[in-house]
């Protein structure tokens, strides 16, 4: 769905393999890590990237999973079926 929405997809893993991120997207103001979860697992890498002072360009993240829409102060949660609306969300979020 992300490819069909026009995203070039990039996977990231740091050298010591403590942080691993599925995808990144960008809005006008920031780089947004996007994590896809097949279970209701914790999002350790997503939290580390958002909290890291070295990643000042990352203001929030997005988690795609089998849950309802939500925001916990760090990242937005969206159900899988709403992935096609991600580009629209990012565009409207910056306005």
Image (cartoon, rainbow, N blue to C red):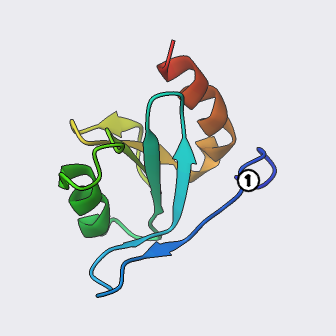
Any part of residue 42 in sight: no
Any part of residue 22 in sight: yes
The part of the image, by quadrant, that contains residue 56 is top left
The residue sitting at 54% across, 61% down in the picture is 23
Query: Residue 89: where, in percent of width, then height?
Result: 56, 28
Number of marks in the image?
1
Query: Residue 84: where, in percent of width, then height?
Result: 69, 41
Query: Residue 27: where, in percent of width, then height?
Result: 54, 33
When the figure is inspected, residue 89 is found, relative to residue 67, above or below; the finding is: above
The residue sitting at 40% across, 70% down in the picture is 39
When the figure is inspected, residue 70 is found, relative to residue 91, above or below; the finding is: below
Q: Secondary structure at mark 1?
A: loop
| Side of 65 relative to 71 (left or right) | right
- Residue for badge 1: 1
| Side of 10 relative to 53 (left or right) | right
Query: Residue 69: where, in percent of width, then height?
Result: 41, 37
Residues 83 and 7: in front is: 7
């Amino acid at each position: 769905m992300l490819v069909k929405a026009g995203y070039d997809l990039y996977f990231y893993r740091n050298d010591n393999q403590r942080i691993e991120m599925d995808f990144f997207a960008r809005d006008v103001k920031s780089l947004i890590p996007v994590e896809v979860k097949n279970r209701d697992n914790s999002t350790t890498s997503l939290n580390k990237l958002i909290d890291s002072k070295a990643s000042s360009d990352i203001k929030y993240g997005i988690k795609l999973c089998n849950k309802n829409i939500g925001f916990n102060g760090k990242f937005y949660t969206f159900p899988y079926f709403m992935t096609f609306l991600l580009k629209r969300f990012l565009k409207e979020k910056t306005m």
